[in-house]
Image (spheres, helix red, strand yellow):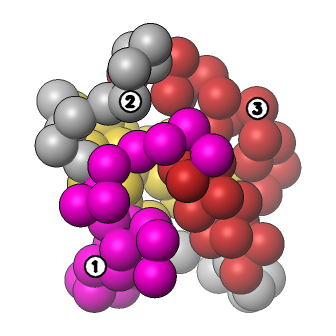
Amino acid sequence: MELIIHFNTLPEGLTLDLVKDDLAGILEDDGWLTGSGANYLELELEDEKVNPKYGILTVKGYLQKAKFAPDTTIELAGTPVGIYE
């Protein structure tokens, strides 16, 4: 399942490369980075036959803990959801 993180700014002290490294570390075998740009990160979560719930919760938890802005969203199947919802 494809998950896209949309953000306007990165939290203070973080760079895009640091966020990529952090996500790669916490997802391990549950997902991987497939693309990125100035204001988005694109991830693939697990095999389509496996429930990606763990990967989604892991990413959302990381974004909250890293203090991403409230307007940051994760997009699943074309539907954006706020990371604090």
Identify which residue, 14 or 40, lies in the foreground: 14
Between 31 and 81, the residue placed more toward the observer is: 81
Q: Seen in the image, is 70 located left or right of residue 47?
A: left
Which residue: 28% across, 86% down?
A: 79
Rendered location of residue 71, percent (x, y): 24, 61
Residue depicted at 28% across the width and 79% down the height: 80
Q: Give left or right: position of 83 versus 26.
A: left
Pointer 3 residue: 25
Q: Residue at x 46, y 82 (%)?
A: 85
Q: Position of residue 70 (x, y in %)?
A: 32, 60
Q: Is residue 32 visible?
A: no
Residue 82 position (above or below residue 64) = below
The span picked out in magenta is: 65-85
Q: Earlier in the sequence, mark 1 or mark 3?
A: 3
Q: Could you say which is closer to the camera, residue 73 or residue 49? A: 73
Q: Which residue is mark 1?
A: 80
